[in-house]
Amino acid sequence: MSFNFDLNTFVLGIIQGLCEFLPVSSSGHLAILQNFFNMGNEENLAFDLFLHCATVLAILIYFRREILKIIYGWFTGWFKKDKGGGWLYGWQIFIVTFLTGVIGLPLRKVAEKFLTSLTSIGCGLIFTAIILALVPVISKRNKKYSWFTTALIIGIAQGIAVLPGVSRSGMTIAAGILAGLGFAEAFEFSFIASVPAVLGAALLEGLKALKSGELFMPSGWIFAILIAFILGLVTLNFMRKLVISGRWAYFGLYCLAVGSAVILFSLKIF
């Protein structure tokens, strides 16, 4: 089998690997570049599906010990009086996933339209910048919510983040901090709780593409998928240090600059 290297898709793989876990919206960046590369809607769907599966695999490997502990704690919790942390953690993930579906599915058609609108993507990035700017303020709150309320807040945030330009990691980590979680806790929960939602969305999109005969993978895509996976692992480690140190301002300024530039470009101001 021959593998044909394609520079455009390789660049998109780099963007996915770098931006999926940073609070800058990988979907927004992919949509912007796909617009410039003139990739068709069907091609976008299949390509994004494979890229997201690559970065989900990075999450599963990076958090493998924590995930196995949660799965063990949740399943054994059905048979123990002393439920343990894994039991509650598992139910929190279930609530977050459920709310993501309840909010995200109705927004899906809107999100698909926004993917073709640079103005909408730019607005999403500016909204992300505002959320990131609020993190230092909300991190000073002393109030800590219950495990159930925490899951509700993060689930709502993750549901809203289906809109292109709105960073999922930025929204959910900020929501976790708002709910009273520490930086390290918010980081871990944000990414572990994203796995069922991303896999569920990938399954739905995969079945849809398979049914319409649009699910395909040109040989050149393998390089983009591999680089997205490798950079995803690297970026996760970097993001952990970033979150714990509380250095959010740089990414807020970045989202504001890119969002503004995209809107100005779409309006043909420059």
Image (cartoon, helix red, strand yellow):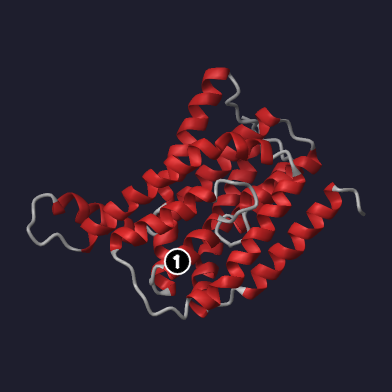
Tell me what residue is drawn at x 56 percent, y 63 percent. 235
Figure quadrant of the N terminus: top right
Q: Say which residue appears at 57% left-offset and 18% top-offset.
A: 212
- Residue at the image point whose x is 75% and y is 60% from the top: 258
Expressed as whole percent of the image width and height from the top left, the position of residue 19 reads 62, 57
Q: Residue at x 24, y 58 (%)?
A: 88
Question: Residue 144: percent from the left, percent from the top?
Answer: 34, 73
The quadrant of the image that shows the C terminus is: bottom right
Give residue 84's quadrant in the image: bottom left
The residue tagged 1 is 187
Residue 16 on image: x %, y %: 62, 51
The front one of 20 and 137 is: 137
Q: Please indicate whether residue 226 sits to the left or right of residue 95 in the image.
A: right
Asked if residue 80 lies left or right of residue 137, the reply is: left
> Does the rendering let one see residue 62?
no
Q: Could you say where residue 222 lies in the image, as x and y percent from the top left? A: 61, 40
Q: Is residue 9 above or below residue 191?
A: above
Left/right of residue 241 with respect to residue 267 in the rendered view: left
Farthest-out residue, right: 270
Q: Secondary structure at mark 1?
A: helix
- In this rendering, the answer to whether 213 lies above or below 63 is above
Q: Amino acid at mark 1?
A: Phe
User: For the image shown, how many numbered marks are present on the structure?
Assistant: 1
| Mark 1 residue crowding within 10 angstroms, few (<14) / some (14–19) / many (20+) | many
Q: Is residue 251 visible?
A: yes
